[in-house]
Amino acid sequence: MNLISVLPEILILAIGILILIVEPFWKPEDRHGLGWLTAGGLVLTALVSLLFGRPSAPELVWGGMLRFDWLGFFFKMLFLFGGAATVLFLMGVEQINRRGEVYVLLLASLLGMNLMVSSANLVMLYLAIETTSIPLYVLAGFLRTDDKSTEAGFKYLLFGVMASAVMLYGFSLLVGFSGTTDMYAMVEALRRSGLPLFSVIGVILLLLVGFGFKVAAVPFHFWAPDVYEGAPTPIAGFLSTASKAAAFVVLLRVFLVLFPLEAVQWSLVLAILAALTMTLGNLLALAQKNIKRLLAYSSIAHAGYVLIGVAAISTESGEFFAFSISSVAFYLLVYLVTNLLAFGVVITYYRVVGSDDIPAYNGLSWRHPWLALALLAALLSLAGMPPFGGFIAKVVIFAAAIKVGLIWLAVVGVLNSIVGLYYYLIVLKHVYLYRNEALEGQPLPIPGPYAIALVVLALGVLLLGTVFGPWFSLAEGAAAAFF
Amino acid sequence: MNFPVLSLIVFTPMVAAVLILLMPAEKRNETRALALAAATFALLLSIWIYATYLIRGLSGYQFVEEYEWLPALGLKLIFGVDGMSAPLVLLTGIVMFTGVLISWGIDDPHTPTGIQERPREFFAFLFILASGVFGVFASLDLFMLFFFYEIAVFPMYLLIVIWGWVVTREYAAMKLTLYLFIGSVISLVGALAMYFQSGMNTFDMRLLEQANFPTEFQIFWFLPVFLGFAVLGGIWPFHNWSPDGHVAAPTAVSMFHAGVLMKLGAFAALRVGIMLLPEGAKYWSWLIMTLAAIGVVYGAYIAFVQTDFKYMVGFSSVSHMGLVMLGFSTLTREGLLGSGIQMFSHGVMTALFFAVVGMVYDRAHTREIPELEGMHKVMPFASIGFIIGGLVSMGMPGFSGFVAEFPIFMGVWKTQWFVAVITSISIVITAGYIMRNVRMVFFGEIPEKFHGHLPPLTFMDELAIVFLCLFMVGLGLFPSLMVPMVQTGVDHILNLLGGA
């Protein structure tokens, strides 16, 4: 049973080792196959885990280090999917697609994420977070000849380490107050210790700094645009989706497990954070001229939307709502697929055109109508328009807020989605209206791996938005595993 | 379960859009033919639905289909029409069909008419829009209504921004999209509040109608819900997007826009606002009546002073949609009946107006009324069509406009007689600007500069005009083709209002 619970992790590790073994034996020009091997391996991992590694009732395994439940499993599958798509996108980036260590680093980070979402012990959790982050620092700065990439890697490292340290300080306070590292045993211990309100608030703030950094919530968001802009674009896409989703799951788990404690209205704190994050992210996105920076600010805004759902989990009465958790899980699912699609189009287009400026997108719809359509789907889904996934995701998030009486927050979210629509439409205007006669006749080749990833992601965005019954029940299953 | 005719009609344009996108870009005429075939199919289906409803003398929700969508939240796909929405489904079929005809045009390098630039994408987006419109009219589920409502809104942006009038298209398209999006999301918040308030875990409007929300709840949420939709219905003072949007849009899109989309707003405001929150409607009816009355007179007056042909038609739409809202606000049998018919009548009429304006502009390259003259000699069909449309617009007996406007004024008279007096001024103003335009644009001598430059109408154009006129005259001469049907819808609404 213990082994089954870490089946995905074992398989990921196996792929990594396999890559390291075969790489020296393959000629450099054949090393393209490394990407296929990784992506295929990840898909296979997901399939095998779905067949044999499904959790039943939630249980603590590995001496209480991990919790084997649907919540973790749901997100593990999501990360495997996102990881496979990212690998496919990495295969077209000339400087790095033949280097085995890129794939190994990505796999290590995936491994960390998988452990993050199932950790039940603070020590394990911290280890998992670092396992996720350290490879990502390296990956963000992987293009050594590119100053921007190096800068991105270094910036991400400095801010990340700082946030980690603050978070670790919060953890140590928790352990000190309660005398245990087991998250599920901690509540009782804290209750017994009669902790003063002041120190609870202090701990919450310290943890919020750490998680706020990982999800790029205001006011800990400022690293995101620079890092996304400088990092290799597939990595930026990965950072803005899988890494963010993992941090949200940890946020959910830690707060839900630790703070059924009375007297702290952390729902209100999170609601204010959500409102600030959406508003600032959207307003700053308005001014962007570079599509990666635009997507970075938009992803900050989306962290704000998710925080609406998190804030709606608990009301003043301290009651938890499974519906809010499902809405968060579902939003993260839709957001991951959608944002990967958006980044995918940016990667594909950059590979040919060599520019990420929004005006460079002029004439795209003449040059390649299908790629333009994929971007349309991604951006409208981000804006929350049907028949794409973003619509239903936004509806359930707002519904969660209205259900617990946070109507003001839902209204702020609604107003924000209007601002969002505005800047997404500006990009589409460049794609569909403005022309670039010089480039329009030229071909726009899309490499095989890109085509596969784009088609799968685009279908995903459409399916999530039309046949949402089964997906939402998965999210509900994940939410139910909390209790 | 019957033959699923409503889901067929909703998804026909959607499937057609995908097929059209798969056509090679250079096969332009084949693309158009495919579009026309799909539009004809949808038209036939809508006529079939309408005729069945009428001939069998049905009432209540008919052709109902139910599919599970998201059981956890009680979301369902529920298709169904009643006496209010069946005429609107027919209207959508008509406008879709004529819109495709009008957009065919001639590919003349000097005076291209219709849509010659990227027809493939144009028809694809237009059909996605049509699918959304059909979906709203045919939905009995509140969530599904929003789903299709948003689908109807966003293609508008691309349709205007790509194929619109170069001068104002970027501004107008953005303005329109943001206005409509703001309106709809505000209504959405209200709809979610209703969902949780009812506690029935369903968005089924047939059940929510019976939910008996507390009066304070209804009074609080009625305005956001009603006005959110009424933005698309062009209610004053939120009408601002509409003339700009109409003018900037290409002809077929203006037809859709003024002809069908504004009804979408009015219809949703009726179905969600008035029918689900009847107490709120009673409480706020004075406000809706005031806004509508201002819109009626103001729209007519602004239309009167326009020198741009298309702006004139655009503001006349504001005025006529004001009449629809005015009829709603009376909450009486006459007013609601008139509004129901006015939605259809105005849809056909304004589609015809915009079609004629488009034909004139495509040929003369100007819409300034003082510069146009003698168009009757070049395009007699357009001129006769415009005159018939004008008579409808003035509410002349024998045309559909009379059948619609007369009951509205009766209803208003019963409720607030002085509002009826004030708003009837709009009829005079309307007659003024219509007749002035007929004289200035269509009669007189053709100016020197137009000699030999004005190609005649194509067969497709003439067919579209004749087709639209047929409905306006037919309904005017035989009101019984529609009145009993709308009557059944009105009866149901009056029931919900407590038999007022």
Image (spheres, coloured by chain):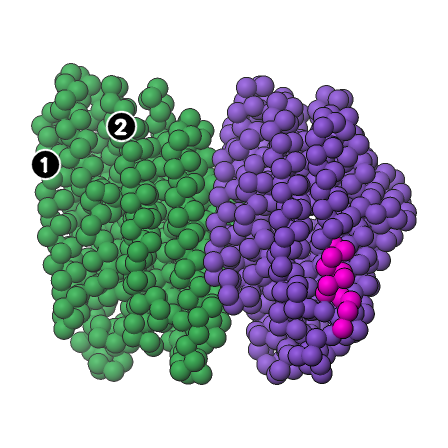
Chain colours: A green, B purple
Task: Establish if A438 lies above or below A257.
Answer: below
Residue shown at 13% from the left, 56% from the top:
A155
Residue B251 % position (x, y): 64, 64
Residue A419 % position (x, y): 39, 48
Residue B335 % position (x, y): 75, 33
Q: Mark 1 highlights which residue? A: A169
Residue A266 is labelled as 2
All told, the count of numbered labels is 2
| A335 or B160, nearer to the observer | B160
Crowd band around label 1 with a 10 angstrom C-alpha radius: few (<14), some (14–19), many (20+): some
Judged left or right of residue B5, residue B150 is left
Query: In the image, what residue type sits under mark 1?
Result: Tyr
Residue shown at 33% from the left, 43% from the top:
A278
Q: Which residues are magenta?
A: B434-445
The image quadrant that residue A85 belongs to is bottom left
Residue B415 is labelled as none
Using the rendered image of the protein, determine whether residue A277 is visible from the camera's viewpoint.
yes
In which quadrant of the rendered image does the C terminus of chain A lie?
Answer: top left
Q: Secondary structure at mark 1?
A: helix
Task: Establish if A149 lies above or below A246.
Answer: below
The image quadrant that residue A168 belongs to is top left
Which comes sooner in the sequence, label 1 or label 2? Answer: 1
